[in-house]
Image (cartoon, grey):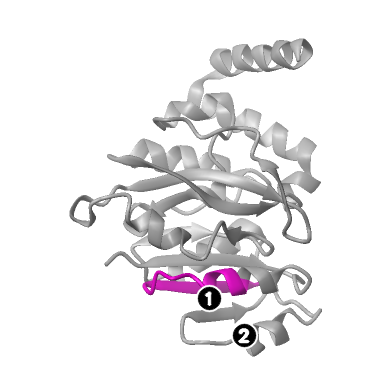
Amino acid sequence: MNKLSVITVTFNAVATLERTLRSVREQSWPHIEHLIIDGGSDDGTLELIKRQQQERLHWVSEPDKGLYDAMNKGVAMATGDYLCFLNAGDTFFSADSVEQLMGTFDEASAPDILYGETAIVDSAGTFLHMRRLKAPESLVWKSFRQGMVVCHQAFIVKRELFEPYDLDYRFSSDFDWSIRMMKKAKTIHNSRLTLINYLNEGMTTRNRKASLKERYRIMAHHYGQFSTFAHHLWFIVRALVK
């Protein structure tokens, strides 16, 4: 049976981490591990993790070079067949989300990448709306020319496919990484499920301008300068029309 490694990167996340811990712990799928990669919190995060300690939860707390360095560390610790990255405050959509996901494909021909939809929630975990960008019926590496059409948390990759996040990107390395993973993948599977509740207060949201600049660089690298410029002109026209 396919095992899922859930990786959560934290730093002073005591206010939001508990519901993420609970969501992973309460998943009905038994083949799951939760890895907490903490950057040296001093706000009670570690005490919370220790209180929630159980056999499927593993953690480390030490200085790192930022979010994506910590994600790379998490993968180095992972033992699952698939990788899922949940921020503190994010949760699975329901208690049987992983079980449902694993039931959407034949284990004998397990896809390289699994994906689905994402719901947006507030700081209390209350549903606000579905993510603005809907996951496409068929996902390919060129799909991200339209933006990050699948949320990083709902983009689940085989561990054997993994390449490290590029630390040259501070805010949008997940965008670059997702494109690289899709370029490598032989099979990409649409689960047609809402998989994740996403807390809309992440680092990229707080640093939106810098993130958008990085995304433009990433798109130009993968899709070419002309195509990227043309698509951004279309984004502007579309926004003005709306």
Residue placed most toward the observer, 232 or 109: 109
Residue under the image location 62 percent in, 85 percent down: 52
The magenta stretch spans residue 33: yes
Q: Position of residue 31 (x, y in %)?
A: 36, 72
Q: Quadrant of residue 141?
A: top left
Q: Secondary structure at mark 1?
A: helix
Q: Secondary structure at mark 2?
A: loop
Can you say which quadrant of the picture contains the C terminus? Answer: top right
Q: Which residue is mark 2?
A: 52
Q: Earlier in the sequence, mark 2 or mark 1?
A: 1
Which label belongs to residue 100? none
Q: CA distance from mark 2 to mark 1?
A: 9 Å
Q: Amino acid at mark 1?
A: Arg
Residue numbers of the magenta segment: 21-38
Which label belongs to residue 25? 1
Residue under the image location 58 percent in, 45 percent down: 118
Q: Position of residue 57 (x, y in %)?
A: 51, 80
Query: Are dots 2 and 1 in contact, CB under 8 Å?
Result: yes
Residue under the image location 63 percent in, 43 percent down: 172
Q: Amino acid at mark 2?
A: Gln
Q: Is residue 156 left or right of residue 22?
A: left
